[in-house]
Image (cartoon, rainbow, N blue to C red):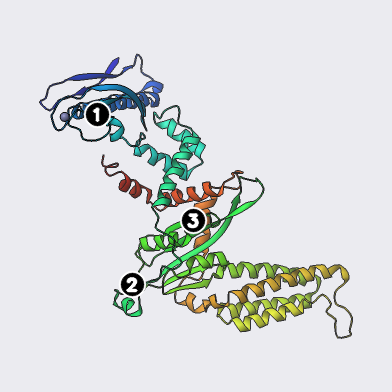
């Protein structure tokens, strides 16, 4: 059996000016392996269709613009250059004529190339879109192989071009951003009072994680990731490399603004209290509030509890005392009573004294145990500093919890995993430049938030119209 696949062009008057051969499909016998279409055939069909279609469209366009719009005289063609149009369905190389302006043209130029003017970019937006989407979701090599597996993309497509295209999209997004400001909160009290009553608070969790540095192969640098959850509507994630980003506040503001944040709306930031994280959220909104994340407090308490349990194995009395102080410190912190919590932490510190003596004046600890106690005392001291430094961000967690309000960035942990770990994986020994990681985070968060398509529709109206 033989099939001839042709593309028949039909003119407006119903006549058929041309028929293009697309492919001949031969099927001599019938078995499971050759039933129906094969992927390679569909790729060739698409590539051939694309070739015919692109040439015909550009040919017709050239014919239309060849006569001068003023005098209708056909312009002469001085010479030709070549344009390579890159698409998901292969590269098409077309001849691009250079036309000579006729005498009615007032400009200085003697010639012009209509196709170069028509196509400021030579790559189909759909190609860039899919490359960016998959390059953001999967390693560049995997994404490139996947696209080449299913589409007749050109043989010149490779992980490097995919990466370049993805980062170019990210750079364009970065250029579109407004200026950085140290303050975004606006509105006087009376202006705020006139705004409609907002639905409820927006809760933003911010956390940091580290990825491997490409430049020296040894160190790591920090990536900030966050998730913003409005009272109603979709939550959005965001990410940036703090040491590279020049507009972290603008970035966060744009996310909140996109979620419809009003200046009279409460915005609650949860983080583990790092100063760099706190700076980002300052002055974004008149009603913003920072809360030290309960999740991070308990993580630190767990480390101390493990230490105290270790001490208990060596001296039950001291261990029990340490655990008792820790429990009450936690209880006071849970109720937002910072002063009492700090008292308990100090008692804890004192009870772990390496030179502690019993009632008979004998030293409790042998010299071998003293370094361990000093180490644990140091942890306790660090925890005390952490609580003191963040005391203004400590709230009555118990009360918030009972009221059904968020107290923890546990939800950010999953965002870190979702945004960073799955793509920037340390396990796979991936290494990143700060710029490369920062830019990829921009397209990746757009893809994960379901916003990349909207960006392309804005940049290339009609791109998805089909
Ligand atoms: Zn003319």
Q: From where the camera sits, is residue 315 visible?
A: yes
State which quarter of the image contains the C terminus. top left
Q: Earlier in the sequence, mark 2 or mark 3?
A: 2
Q: Residue at x 20, y 19 (%)?
A: 18
Nearer to the camera, 312 or 73: 73
2 and 3 marks in contact (CB < 8 Å): no
State which quarter of the image contains the N terminus. top left
Residue 185 placed where, x, y %?
40, 70
Cα gap from disc 1 to disc 2, whole angstroms: 51 Å
Q: Which mark is residue 368?
A: none
Give the residue at mark 3. 239
Above or below — where is 314 with respect to 425? below
Above or below — where is 71 with respect to 234? above
Residue 17 placed where, x, y %?
17, 20
Q: Residue at x 40, y 55 (%)?
A: 177
Nearer to the camera, 247 or 399: 247
Q: Which mark is residue 198?
A: 2
Residue 287 image-quadrant placement: bottom left
Q: Quadrant of ligand 1?
A: top left
Answer left or right for 412 relative to 105. Answer: right
Q: From where the camera sits, is residue 422 visible?
A: no
Q: Nearer the viewer, mark 1 or mark 2?
A: 1
| Secondary structure found at label 1 | helix
Answer left or right for 20 relative to 37. Answer: left
Q: How many marks?
A: 3
Cα gap from disc 1 to disc 3, whole angstroms: 42 Å
| Secondary structure found at label 2 | loop
Residue 252 placed where, x, y %?
44, 61
Give the residue at mark 1. 57
Q: Residue at x 29, y 35 (%)?
A: 117
């Amino acid at each position: 059996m033989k099939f001839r696949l042709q593309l028949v062009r039909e003119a407006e008057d119903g006549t058929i000016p041309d028929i293009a051969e697309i492919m001949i499909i031969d099927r001599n016998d019938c078995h499971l392996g050759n039933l129906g279409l094969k992927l390679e055939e569909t790729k060739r069909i698409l590539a051939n269709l694309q070739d015919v279609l692109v040439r015909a469209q550009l040919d017709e366009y050239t014919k239309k613009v060849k006569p001068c719009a003023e005098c209708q005289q056909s312009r002469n063609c001085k010479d030709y250059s070549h344009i390579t149009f890159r698409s998901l369905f292969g590269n098409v190389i077309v001849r691009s004529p250079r036309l000579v302006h006729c005498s009615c043209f007032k400009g200085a130029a003697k010639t012009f190339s209509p196709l170069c003017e028509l196509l400021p970019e030579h790559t189909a937006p759909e190609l860039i879109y899919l490359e960016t989407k998959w390059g953001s979701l999967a390693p560049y090599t995997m994404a490139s192989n996947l696209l080449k597996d299913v589409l007749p993309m050109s043989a010149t497509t490779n992980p490097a071009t995919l990466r370049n295209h993805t980062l170019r999209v990210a750079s364009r997004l970065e250029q579109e951003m407004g200026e950085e400001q140290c303050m975004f909160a606006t509105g006087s009290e009376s202006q705020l009072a006139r705004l409609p009553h907002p639905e409820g608070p927006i809760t933003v969790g911010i956390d940091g994680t580290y990825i491997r540095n490409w430049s020296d192969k040894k160190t790591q640098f920090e990536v900030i990731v966050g998730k913003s959850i409005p009272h109603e509507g979709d939550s959005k994630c965001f990410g940036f490399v703090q040491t590279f980003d020049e507009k972290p506040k603008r970035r966060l503001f744009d996310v909140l603004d996109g979620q419809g944040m009003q200046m009279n709306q409460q915005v609650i930031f949860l983080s583990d209290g790092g100063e760099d994280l706190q700076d980002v959220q300052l002055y974004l909104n008149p009603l913003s509030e920072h809360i030290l994340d309960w999740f991070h407090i308990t993580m630190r308490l767990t480390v101390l509890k493990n230490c105290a349990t270790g001490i208990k194995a060596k001296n039950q009395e001291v261990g029990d005392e340490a655990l008792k102080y820790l429990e009450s410190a936690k209880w006071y912190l849970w109720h937002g009573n910072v002063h009492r919590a700090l008292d308990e932490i100090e008692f804890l510190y004192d009870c772990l004294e390496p030179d502690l003596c019993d009632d008979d004046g004998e030293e409790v600890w042998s010299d071998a145990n003293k370094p361990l106690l000093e180490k644990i005392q140091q942890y306790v001291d660090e925890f005390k500093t952490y609580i003191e430094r963040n005391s203004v961000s400590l709230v009555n967690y118990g009360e918030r919890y009972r009221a059904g309000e968020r107290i923890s960035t546990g939800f950010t942990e999953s965002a870190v995993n979702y945004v960073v770990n799955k793509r920037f994986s340390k396990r796979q020994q991936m290494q990143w430049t700060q710029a490369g990681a920062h830019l990829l985070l921009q397209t990746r968060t757009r893809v994960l938030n379901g916003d990349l398509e909207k960006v392309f529709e804005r940049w290339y109206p009609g791109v998805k119209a089909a």
